[in-house]
Image (cartoon, rainbow, N blue to C red):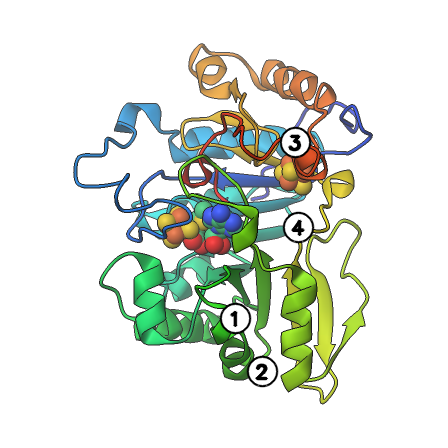
Amino acid sequence: MADTPKFRISRVDDARGRPVRDLRISVTDRCNFRCPYCMPAEVFGEHYTFLPREEILTFEEIARLARVFVSLGVRKVRITGGEPLLRTDLVGLVTRLRAIDGIDDLTLTTNGLLLARHAEALARAGLDRVTVSLDSVDPDVFRALSGRNVELADVLAGVDAAAAAGLTPIKLNCVVQRGVNVDGIEALCERFRGTGHIVRFIEFMDVGTLNGWDLSKVVPAREILDLVNARFPIRPIEPGYRGEVARRYAYEDGGGEIGVIASVTAPFCGDCTRARLSTRGDLVTCLFANQDLNLRAALRAGEDDDALANLIARRWRGRDDRYSEERNARTPDVPAPRIEMFRIGG
Ligand code: SAM
Ligand code: SF4
Ligand code: SF4
């Protein structure tokens, strides 16, 4: 039976007129990879302390908050992490979220290592699509970038299983870093052309404070497109919907499409309608935020749904974030304190 929110604050816009349309839910701060740009192994070693269980939102709490967000206008929900497939019984969360009336698009972002095992059950529970992060199709480069002794073949099997389960169209996210995986761009295109899957190249971002980001490691989207175009001619196509962050390009020969996400060289804050719910229940209004609002405390203090909706609405109305647009004006040598990516998902 559909779980329809019974309360409604009319559409909530932030200080820049942006509604809240998307919710990204981080279900765990743990990961089975150690991607250097996200959870570098030297920081997240054996002795790193992850969140204790009692600080992590339960599925019941997540579903309740998701329902409140839907009442405020959210239509797209993405499950992320850390690595979301490490969370026990993730299928149970998908079932709960699918039961909420008003979610038009329910998706999951994963590194894909455990996807072959779970794809069918996730699809049966009502997941619409998956995005798999894949920075290289060269097994050795892939292993180095994952920071763990893992097999590319397992991720590719996960992609195939997701396709067989109907979790399509599958998006494959590749973070491009100069001197690291630029040489593999063509191979990624080649591997997925004609499959219906969409490779999206993402500019390396200065999220968090631990990944040693600097501008010289960013490969601008323009350069990526030129590289692809030289091998497989492409042409721009219309966005799928207003506010789509990826710019889309189709192969001239009908081999499908690719995307680029130019978060550094062509920021899209003006259309940013994304809220993030961290593993421990903080509302984060920007990927680069250094502040959050703890919703878990309100939940566990027994606040009702209306009170939670009011709390979220008040925070959203005060939102003025446009970090990426402001980035270039800032002094690069003075990093601002920020929440790490693995706590809030991508
Ligand atoms: N573990 C899952 C995965 O890797 O797909 C989900 C969480 S991960 C934090 C979500 C996305 O953030 C991944 O696609 C990852 O490549 C991206 N990401 C992490 N750090 C990034 C950075 N510094 N710049 C750009 N993208 C980044
Ligand atoms: Fe894990 Fe995803 Fe971060 Fe890589 S990007 S360390 S897979 S959370
Ligand atoms: Fe949205 Fe913040 Fe990214 Fe701008 S920098 S697009 S406001 S998450």
Disc 3 to disc 4, C-alpha distance: 38 Å
Q: Which residue is mark 3?
A: 330
Mark 1 Cα shell of 10 Å, populated few (<14), some (14-19), many (≥20): some
Residue 154 or 230: which is nearer the viewer?
230
Which callout, 3 or 2, points at the residue further toward the start of the chain? 2
Identify the residue at horizontal 24%, vertical 30% (top origin).
49
Position of the N terminus, as image quadrant, is top right
Q: Residue at x 57, y 74 (%)?
A: 197
Please tell me the numbered disc located at residue 104: 4
| Residue on which disc 2 sits | 193
Look at label 2 and name its amino acid.
Arg
Residue drawn at x 28%, y 39% is 43
Q: Is residue 56 visible?
A: yes
Q: Please say if the residues under marks 3 and 2 sit with CB atoms less than 8 Å apart.
A: no
Identity, as a three-letter code, of the amino acid under mark 1: Gly
Secondary structure beneath label 2: loop
**Quadrant of residue 69 within the rendered picture:** top right
In the image, residue 306 above or below residue 102: above
Name the side, left or right, on which 300 lies relative to 231: left
Q: Can you say whether 107 is above or below 234 in the image?
A: above
Of the numbered discs 4 and 1, the one sitting upstream in the chain is 4
Going by the numbered disc 3, the residue's amino acid type is Arg
- Say which label, 3 or 4, has the lower sequence index: 4
Q: CA distance from mark 3 to mark 1?
A: 44 Å
Of circles 4 and 2, which is in front? 2
Residue in view at x 80 percent, y 28 percent: 16
